[in-house]
Image: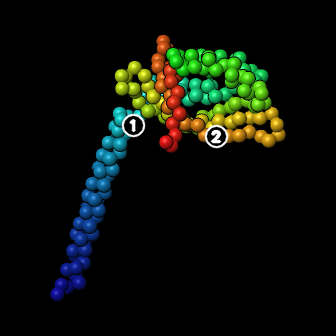
Amino acid sequence: MSSPSSVSARLPLIVAAVCGLLVAALIVAFVHVHSVSSQHSKQSKSGFAVSSEQADVVTAAATEAANIITFSRRTFDADFARATNGTTGSLKTDLLGKKALTLTTMTQGKFDLKATVGASAYAGKTDDGKSTLVLVTLNAFKVADSSTGSTASVQRFQMTMVKVGKSWLASNLAAVGIQ
């Protein structure tokens, strides 16, 4: 057996060895955490970040989707102009063709239409690369004159957006839902 003085003499060496192992473990852990953090930062900057163009097209699509559904009878002409100014092509033609019907229906039914954006997301470029697809969820309201309040519904759309000059315009609007 070891004598007590022999154990006492080795105690500082044992403590130093244990402390050395703890320091080495901490250094390894720090290097690993720093490496993972650095890798995550690189991924955030490259693959997961939204470009300014993507943010701009999503904002334009969300705004236009709400504009296409928001009409007040009192300010109908201005609301309709705002909605059609953000469109192009067949979508603009379709909207212009339904202007009178929209106002007549709202007037006879004594209601206004309002929409707020619930969510929007960049979906990518079209196959030909000429347009961009954006998904938009709207909270749409039919606001009646009567005291019955408003009727709400959730609307989901895929907007096809094209860049015309410096502006993003909607060229197609397709309802997205459970088939």
Q: Which structural element holds mark 2? A: strand
Within the image, what quadrant is residue 75 found in? Answer: top right
Task: Residue at the far right: name it.
Answer: 147
Within the image, what quadrant is residue 73 found in? Answer: top right
Where is residue 140 drawn, in percent x and y?
A: 65, 36
Where is residue 39 drawn, in percent x and y?
A: 32, 42
The earlier-in-sequence mark between 2 and 1 is: 1
Where is residue 51 drawn, in percent x and y?
A: 43, 28
Q: Is residue 175 left or right of residue 38?
A: right
Viewer-closest of 21 and 127: 127
Residue under label 1, please give it. 48
Residue under label 2, please give it. 153
Q: Is residue 68 above or below residue 26?
A: above
Viewer-closest of 41 and 67: 67
Q: Which structural element holds mark 1? A: loop
Q: Is residue 120 left or right of residue 25?
A: right
Q: Is residue 79 visible?
A: no
Where is residue 122 drawn, in percent x and y?
A: 46, 32
Q: Is residue 151 left or right of residue 168?
A: right
